[in-house]
Image (cartoon, rainbow, N blue to C red):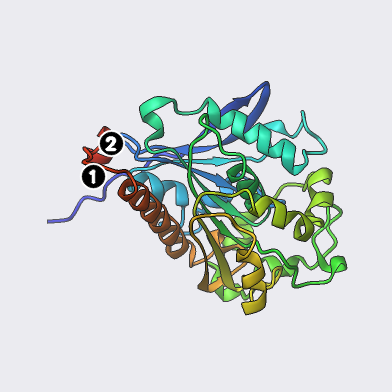
Amino acid sequence: MARSIPDQPEVRPVTLDADGTPLSGLLAVPERSVPRAVVVALHGGGMSAGYFDSRARPGLSLLRLGAELGFTVLSLDRPGYGASADRLPEGLDLAGQTQTVRSALAGFAPGEARGAGFFLVAHSSGGRLALSAAGEESGDVPLIGVDISGLGSRFAVERRELPSRDGRGAWRKHWGALRFYPPDALVTSGGLVRPVPSREAGEGLLWPRMYPAIAARVRVPVRFTFAEQEQWWRHDEEAVRELLAPLAAPRAEVVRQLDAGHNISLGWAARTYHLRALAFLEECLLARDAAIPGPRTASAAQATPVR
């Protein structure tokens, strides 16, 4: 008798309001359970929300995987991309992006629909926004932790090699070896590419100087992932020590993803990385529950089985 294949979670477009600025994105929600938490995915420079919803092969989408495991997953077009591009043609600096995204999340999934809170999964330039948002936590947007790929604090290339709005720069370094990607991944990924807003592009060059002060305000667990062929950022022992040292996070770690280039979520290793990111979320939830004194009763979100 043939086994039936369960329907995959639906991924649908969504638009959030951030004090009058529309932020577009993609949304997947668990179909048979109260969401355990909200995973917010933030794409890198020159990409869009679909970066975390690879359709090159089944199983590579973070949105579908997260929803299957009981989480709401929201992949946002960052300010200056998608629906906000016309309103913000030059984009926003990091502080402006932080305020805008936090405003959008404050009105998203109220009450029980948030589960335990928000967990940020970010790639490359989106990681700068994730860390900045984590450093300004408030009750309106309770954060559980942050998982970042493709971002360090020391460049591994010369300034002239960095990507620029006019298309110059060593763009090949985004990918690494082509064997890390499904054969049609580069073609299908072409539809995800967007112009990098000028304010974001200019400020990105300042990140190594900005990082220590931002890291010192982060007080939720943080995990950094470097691809085996990460070529934009240094991730040798000295660079890793410098990356972790300024963080005020209760837990911070660096891991490496084998068989991957910078664009991990578009490659064969996407599912492996996404599972590890969601496992880190599980560990953050477990640690937070363990820190609550006295006897505890599982919340509705925790007690509802995920099927």
Q: Tag 2, which secondary structure?
A: loop
The foreground one among 273 and 146 is 146
Type of the residue with mark 2: Ser
CA distance for labels 2 and 1:
8 Å
Marks 2 and 1 in Cβ contact (< 8 Å)? yes
Quadrant of the image containing the N terminus = bottom left
Residue at 25%, 33% in the rendered image: 300
Q: Which residue is mark 1?
A: 307
The image quadrant that residue 100 belongs to is top right
Q: Which residue is mark 2?
A: 33
Density class for disc 2 (Cα within 10 Å; few <14, some 14-19, many ≥20) is: many
- Please determine whether, in this image, residue 31 is positioned above or below residue 216: above
- Horizontal and vertical percent position of residue 24: 61, 33
Quadrant of the image containing the C terminus = top left
- Residue 304 vs residue 112: left or right? left
Residue at 40%, 59% in the rendered image: 275
The image quadrant that residue 7 belongs to is top left
The foreground one among 269 and 255 is 255
Q: Tag 1, which secondary structure?
A: loop
- Horizontal and vertical percent position of residue 198: 84, 45
